[in-house]
Image: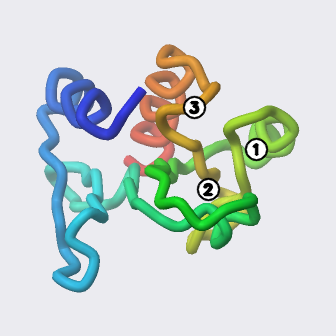
């Protein structure tokens, strides 16, 4: 799943458009609840080595809020990483365009949306 597919999913499911709050990082998009403005997702493009991966190529990632018990299990699977620039106990990073199935990503977006209400 890529960033555009995620944007389409949250638009169709939650009527949410991405927000680009940082001029310094124009590719970083926040997914917010319409009413309260709380974040339920953050899409960034970061160098692989900043994520603890080999290489310096830029990759898209999605941060979502998650149940701490689920985070422990997910981190043992390919495509999931400790949250980049977020609380690692409550957030997880997903590599986009990678091994994580689309259905899992959508389920985690839904969970994050519910957890951040």
Residue 23, horizontal then vertical, whole percent: 17, 82
Left/right of residue 30 with respect to residue 68 in the rendered view: left
Which residue is identified by label 3? Answer: 98
Q: Residues within 10 Å of mark 3 (few under 14, many from 20)?
A: some
Residue beneath the point at 51% across and 48% down: 64
Whether label 3 touches label 2, CB < 8 Å: no
Which residue is identified by label 2? Answer: 91
Residue 16, horizontal then vertical, whole percent: 16, 41
Tally of marks? 3
For label 3, the SS is: loop
Residue beneath the point at 39% across and 50% down: 40
- Quadrant (top left/top right/bottom left/bottom right) for the N terminus: top left
Which residue is identified by label 1? Answer: 71
Whether label 2 touches label 1, CB < 8 Å: yes
State the CA–CA distance, disc 3 to disc 1. 18 Å
Q: Is residue 19 above or below residue 3?
A: below
Q: Quadrant of residue 48?
A: bottom right
Q: Quadrant of residue 78?
A: top right
Precedes in sequence: disc 3 or disc 1 = 1
Pair 3/2: label in front = 3
State the CA–CA distance, disc 3 to disc 2. 19 Å
Residue beneath the point at 22% across and 61% down: 37
Query: Is any atom of residue 116 visible in this view?
Result: yes
Pair 3/1: label in front = 3
Report the front residue among 20 and 12.
20
Residue 42, horizontal then vertical, whole percent: 39, 56
Query: Is any atom of residue 89 visible in this view?
Result: no
């Amino acid at each position: 799943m890529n960033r555009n597919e995620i944007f389409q999913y949250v638009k169709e499911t939650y009527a949410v458009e991405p927000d680009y709050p940082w001029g310094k990082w124009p590719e970083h998009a926040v997914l917010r609840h319409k009413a309260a403005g709380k974040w339920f997702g953050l899409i960034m493009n970061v160098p692989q080595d900043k994520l603890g991966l080999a290489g310096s190529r830029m990759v898209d990632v999605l941060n979502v809020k998650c149940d701490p018990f689920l985070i422990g299990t997910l981190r043992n699977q390919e495509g999931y990483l400790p949250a980049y620039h977020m609380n690692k106990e409550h957030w997880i990073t997903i590599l986009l365009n990678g091994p994580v199935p689309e259905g899992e990503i959508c389920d985690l977006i839904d969970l994050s949306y519910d957890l951040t209400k």
